[in-house]
């Protein structure tokens, strides 16, 4: 029996260390992957912001540019350096937050700044570079270094490993204290005569004393596994052991039959353009109209049309659209329509006059950045009316048609609530 105990102990110890090693490697790789993805997203945001600021007439020494870059360094701890230079090698902007990543610091003179040379652990840091195409100017090159795996993540993993090892030591100590006690008990029996020896041989087989020991060892294994899962959080085996009866009663299936609230409409947004697909437009507009009517507030609808044969300008337009949409309008309120280069934007709690002012500024920024002059807008609002989404879309489309055919690039449909109610009453007599 003692040999069986030791064999089980050795097997469990091997399994424990294999699990601890696999868990550590897996978590390190996951944290490295998450840090890399986060760094790529941040790098793209910086590149788009620099392009937008530069095209808006802000040079690298202007306060808006410095403020924007400082915000990136303040909000993102993983950003370690940012260097911008032209094709001729001239440094336009340089900011090194962590000098430890440099093998040699840049040299500053009155006329020239040398490029920094890097030396860092490639598992902890990633280097990103990309060119920025500026119309009418030489291309700029941007270089950044991100910390994708910080010492905080590594220290957290070490803490978990230490806790797991402490639990293992406690369980091992309990096991070792238990086994010698049985050995001491067996020594007097070995000194007995042959008859007593025969009795001692018969007694362990007749009495179920060893069985509680095996169960105790099994319980030790279960407690150990349970504690490990609590420390490590949910693991794949927990999901696999979940009874299949729980699958059909998850939350999405309960919410799916009654999509009447805003939370039940799951809108997927294109991260590059900031636009949601057209299939979400009508349900979202109906939902927002119902909320506006319930709260007795206004709501406007903006439909935008972009007309240009220059594919490069169209690309610049959509590359900067996401940033400007977040600046001027609410997230998840902008939709691409089935018509090419046509966009719908829902503007809650804004009258048609307020929407016109915001749209003028929005279109002005778009024209300045993309170089596209033919950007048209049609606007309509609820204006204290109980109105359907189809009717509001029709009014905004009509205003857009007048903008395209007229001299004004922004045209709004201004409704008369009294006349509208009279018209509805005539169409639906009691």
Image (spheres, helix red, strand yellow):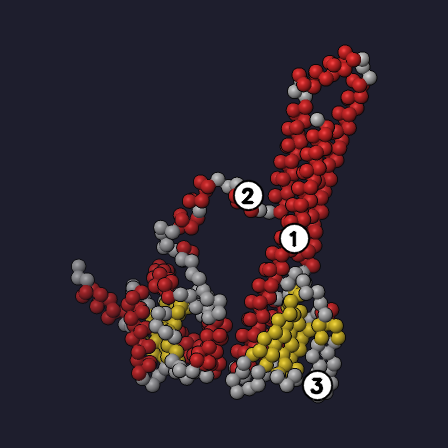
Q: Which mark is residue 238?
A: 2
For this rendering, which residue is in front, 296 or 403?
A: 403
Q: Secondary structure at mark 3?
A: loop
For this rendering, which residue is in front, 381 or 196?
A: 196
- Tell me: 61 left or right of 327: right
Q: CA distance from mark 2 to mark 1?
A: 19 Å
Residue 374 is situated, as x and y percent measured from the top left of the image, at 39, 82
- First in sequence, mark 2 or 1: give its number: 1
- First in sequence, mark 3 or 2: give its number: 3
Residue at horizontal 71 percent and vertical 47 percent from the top: 162
Name which quarter of the figure residue 121 lies in: bottom right
Residue at horizontal 41 percent and vertical 84 percent from the top: 373
Residue 92 is situated, as x and y percent measured from the top left of the image, at 64, 82
Give the labeled residue for mark 3: 112
Q: CA distance from mark 3 to mark 1?
A: 45 Å
- First in sequence, mark 3 or 1: give its number: 1
For this rendering, which residue is in front, 239 or 14?
A: 14
The C terminus sits in image quarter: bottom left
- Is residue 53 visible in the rendered structure shown here? no
Give the labeled residue for mark 1: 25
């Amino acid at each position: 029996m003692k040999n069986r105990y030791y064999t089980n102990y050795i097997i469990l110890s091997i399994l424990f260390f294999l699990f601890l090693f696999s868990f550590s490697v897996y978590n390190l790789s996951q944290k490295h992957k998450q840090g890399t993805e986060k760094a790529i997203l941040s790098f793209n945001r910086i590149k788009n912001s620099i392009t937008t600021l530069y095209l808006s007439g802000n040079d690298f020494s202007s306060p808006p540019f410095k403020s924007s870059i400082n915000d990136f360094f303040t909000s993102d701890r993983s950003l370690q350096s940012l260097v911008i230079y032209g094709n001729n090698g001239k440094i336009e902007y340089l900011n090194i937050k962590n000098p430890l990543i440099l093998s040699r610091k840049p040299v500053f003179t009155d006329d020239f700044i040398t490029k920094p040379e890097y030396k860092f652990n490639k598992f902890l840091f990633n280097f990103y570079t990309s060119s920025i195409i500026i119309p009418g100017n030489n291309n700029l090159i941007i270089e950044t270094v991100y910390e994708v795996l910080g010492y905080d993540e590594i220290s957290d993993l070490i803490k978990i490993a230490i806790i797991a090892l402490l639990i293992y030591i406690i369980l091992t100590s309990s096991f070792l204290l238990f086994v010698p006690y049985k050995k001491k008990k067996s020594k007097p029996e070995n000194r007995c005569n042959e008859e007593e020896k025969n009795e001692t041989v018969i007694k362990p087989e007749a009495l179920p004393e060893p069985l509680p020991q095996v169960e105790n060892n099994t319980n030790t294994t279960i407690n150990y596994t349970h504690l490990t899962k609590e420390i490590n959080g949910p693991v794949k085996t927990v999901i696999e052991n979940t009874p299949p009866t729980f699958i059909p009663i998850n939350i999405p299936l309960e919410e799916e039959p009654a999509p009447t609230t805003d939370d039940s409409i799951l809108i997927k947004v294109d991260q590059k353009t900031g636009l949601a697909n057209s299939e979400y437009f009508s349900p979202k507009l109906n939902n927002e109209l119902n909320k506006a009517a319930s709260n007795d507030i206004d709501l406007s609808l903006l439909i935008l049309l972009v007309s240009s044969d220059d594919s490069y300008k169209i690309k610049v337009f959509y590359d900067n659209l996401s940033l400007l949409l977040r600046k001027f309008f609410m997230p998840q309120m902008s939709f691409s329509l089935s018509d090419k280069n046509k966009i719908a934007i829902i503007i809650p709690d804004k009258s048609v006059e307020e929407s016109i002012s915001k749209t003028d500024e929005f279109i002005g920024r778009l024209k300045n950045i993309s170089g596209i002059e033919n950007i048209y807008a049609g606007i309509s609002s609820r204006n204290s009316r109980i109105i359907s989404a189809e009717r509001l879309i029709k009014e905004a489309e009509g205003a857009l048609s007048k903008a395209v055919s007229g001299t004004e690039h922004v045209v709004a449909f201004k409704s008369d609530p009294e006349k509208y109610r009279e018209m509805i009453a005539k169409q639906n007599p009691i």
